[in-house]
Amino acid sequence: MALNIRTYHDVEDGASDLGEQVAGQQARVDARLAAVRHVVGVMSGKGGVGKSLVTAALATVLARRGHAVGVLDADLNGPSIGRMLGCPRHPLAVHRDGIDPCMAPSGVLVMSMDLLLDPDTALHWNEPSEASFVWRGTQERSALREFLADVRWGPLDALLVDLPPGVGRLAELHELLPDLAGVIAVTIPSAASRDAVGRSLDLAARRGIRVLGLVENLRGYRCETCGDDGPLFGGDASDELSRRFDVDPLGALPFDPTLDRAAAAGALEAWLSAGGATATDLSGIAARVERAVLGEPCATRAAAP
């Protein structure tokens, strides 16, 4: 299925009405998300910190607590949310008024570029090679707008947007959604992550975006045999960032091999049902996000971990 994204030549030939078309797309975004109570970005600024896994796991826990939740994977070049949430690989239903997102086994609605691409196929923009470096950013912004405007999200309590590394996509999301409910920042303990996440937090502060809190991922290694935690990374990025930017810590997660395998298999729902220390850690983080944004939990459809 092809996205309805304007190409370089389309823009060149119709530049005179481009402003009207962008305004029309913005109106579609506003109309589509009118039934979505809160849109929350999940950011890191650095790749490799487990941000997408945190996003997928939080969405699953919130759904188990009775909330209607969607996830938009805004990482167009390295999408993974669909796999982590166990979305089947079959064509998405296309209607005259939009596209149906995938429904994960947890009930979470998902839209991700990996649901539109064949496995092992790189994202390729339909542009002349000599113009691609100029227009790729424009096309990626257009794709984000299309995902928001053309997907039939329906009524949701929360739409989580999994942002790619860097700060650019956060700025674009805020431009599209100035009433963004806030962002969650994900870091690991290392100094490199601290610096990268700090730049994202600085951008959020400059734009007046509410930071709901900070999750420190990969704080130690949880042994799946004895359950004890051992060291993994040096540093105390979460503590430093919390002090520097006056951001509340939402909690910390270790590297848990059982969680990693569950995400790789798209079996987060079953992993949470089995319980365990890391599932309890995730439940505590989700509860803090819930209180910050959603209010009291709804009637659960399954026992939360």
Image (cartoon, rainbow, N blue to C red):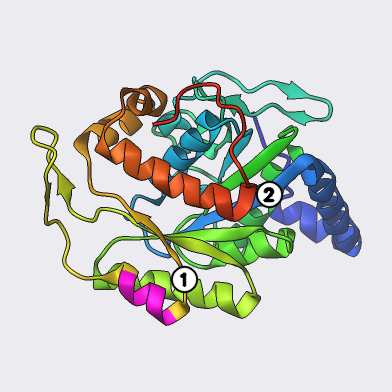
Residue 269 screen position, x and y as percent: 41, 25
Task: Give the magenta-colored segment's residue range.
Answer: 239-244
Which amino acid type is shown beneath numbered disc 1? Val
Q: Which mark is residue 247?
A: 1
The residue located at (38%, 43%) in the rendering is 282
In the depicted view, which residue is nearer to us: 129 or 148?
148
Identify the image quadrant of residue 272. top left
Quadrant in which the C terminus is drawn: top left
What SS does tag 2 mark?
strand
Would you say residue 241 sits in the magenta stretch? yes
Which secondary structure, mark 1? Answer: loop
Q: Is residue 80 visible?
A: no
Percent across and percent down for residue 217 are 31, 54
Q: Is residue 272 above or below residue 193?
A: above
Question: Looking at numbered disc 2 in the image, what kind of residue is underneath it?
Answer: His
Residue 53 lies in the magenta-colored region: no
Residue 165 percent coordinates (x, y): 44, 60
- Left or right relative to 141: residue 79: left
- The residue nearer to you, when weighing 66 against 133, is 66
Q: Label 2: few (<14), some or many (≥20) within 10 Å?
A: some
Instruction: Count how many numbered circles sit on residues in the image.
Output: 2
